[in-house]
Amino acid sequence: MRELTADGNAAAPPQALLERLKDYGQEYTFALWDELSAEERDLLVKDIESLDLSRIDRIIRCSLRSQGLPTAAIEPVPESSVSTVEERTLEERERWWKMGLKAISEGKLAVVLLSGGQGTRLGSSDPKGCFNIGLPSGKSLFQLQAERILCVQRLAAQSTNEGSGGFVPIHWYIMTSPFTDDVTRKFFESHKYFGLEADQITFFQQGTIPCISKDGRFIMETPYKVAKAPDGNGGVYSALKSSRLLEDMATRGVKYLDCYGVDNALVRVADPTFLGYFIDKGVASAAKVVRKAYPQEKVGVFVRRGKGGPLSVVEYSELDPTLASAINQETGRLRYCWSNVCLHMFTLDFLNQVANGLEKDSIYHLAEKKIASTHGYTMGLKLEQFIFDAFPYAPSTALYEVLREEEFAPVKNANGSNFDTPDSAKLLVLRLHTRWVVAAGGFLTHSVPLYATGVEISPLCSYSGENLEAICRGRTFHAPCEISF
């Protein structure tokens, strides 16, 4: 039923709102107004009123304008910016581990988890963190990560000789999206926060941004709703700022932020060694990197923009194939070999600076995608920021090499795909933990070939292979199994 005014004419759109839309060239969002019911009109008005039109207009203009502009030439990352595995001494690693534990025991570290994505490519509509990759324990990614936090808290408390008395919880900020927020909260609640205190976890949502046509006009998902998409994992910066969580961190005495993506089954959450390295280097930002496996591997790599310029990340699709396969004659490595795997450390001061800088510059990446619209699926643009958009703002960035088989087990594609599946991640976990057991003096029996199985060690027993002798020495375990307290 269409809404009529007293004189029998169809009610017009709210004049002030229409004028604002005209200012930004988006007035056609009311094109089908006359065909809408009173309820649908109300929904459309509310939808438009919920948009920060001047901000969105600035983002669209700046992002479209930046397309095709020349960027500074890239250079390989200077060797001096990277701490490689082969260069690190045992003394350094122990010193960094102790420094990190000390900072954690003083409450200076918080953890930020990027968890806005759904497991669509895994064949699940649930948030990725709820996914069980098939380990003997049946634990979800969220549970594995929560238990690593519990383990580090315990190690930090023990390191100050105060045992559980001097315990400082690590605050965990979990970024969801409008599609995953409710399910994520309920998942944590129903699992009693996996042993963490409910008040040491803060959930917050990343923003969404309208999808646009190539000329910058909003795409309508229905006649009364603008099509929107999450603003990318780099939306974490504006989300932390707008929800005042950067202030919350400062109030808690947090100085350093460990920031990572949910879909890595081997992620060392709140890694004391990485934190100690970061503090020791005195930099504003740092990233763990793994060596690129082969030139065409689909990973973004760190580069330097321009002579002496900042480190930043170039996506694999943007890296010229000849540069991708170029070899550094001195090291024998690929010249562009340091892959970004979304394991980052930032100072809180720097996060404030990035949130302001990205907001001021308002440049988003444009991804051409099929978008559900009033005309069926149509090609349009989604606007996204990426977590690595922060690096060009950093006065100093250090890279810390880690071994793929120890810290990087991505869970991106359904089983049956060629790579980054739950099965491949599960095997990486089982193999690593098997090596830990053997190193601690344990033995394994197995009825299938050992390369296809292994054991799982609960994060509550050991964070990175330490303190296992008492559990493993002289004992035999039958793979696959879980070793827990």
Image: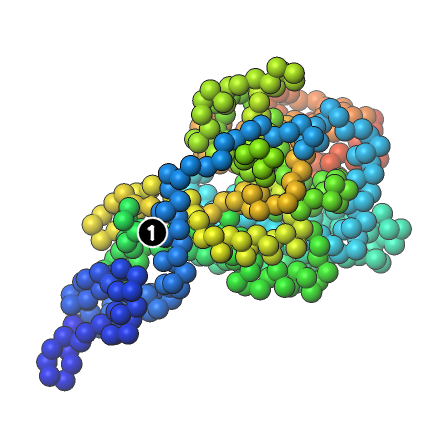
State the residue in front, 17 or 128.
17
Q: Which residue is drawn at 28% across and 74% down?
A: 16
Residue 237 visible in rendering: no
Q: Is residue 297 left or right of residue 435?
A: left
Image quadrant where residue 341 sits:
top right
Residue at 86% x, 51% y is 160
Residue lying farthest to the bottom in this orientation: 6
The residue shown at (25%, 69%) is 18
Residue at disc 1, secondary structure: loop
Is residue 88 or residue 425 the one in the foreground?
88
Residue at (22% x, 53% y) in the render: 374
- Residue 456, compared with residue 293, is above or below; it is below
**Residue 255, position as x, y percentages in the image:** 71, 54
Residue type for callout 1? Cys
Q: Which residue lies furthest to the right in this view?
A: 161
Front one among 278 and 482 = 278
Which residue was labeled with disc 1? 211
In the rendered image, which quarter contains the C terminus?
A: top right
Residue 137 % position (x, y):
63, 39
User: Does 62 sit left or right of 79 as displayed?
Assistant: left
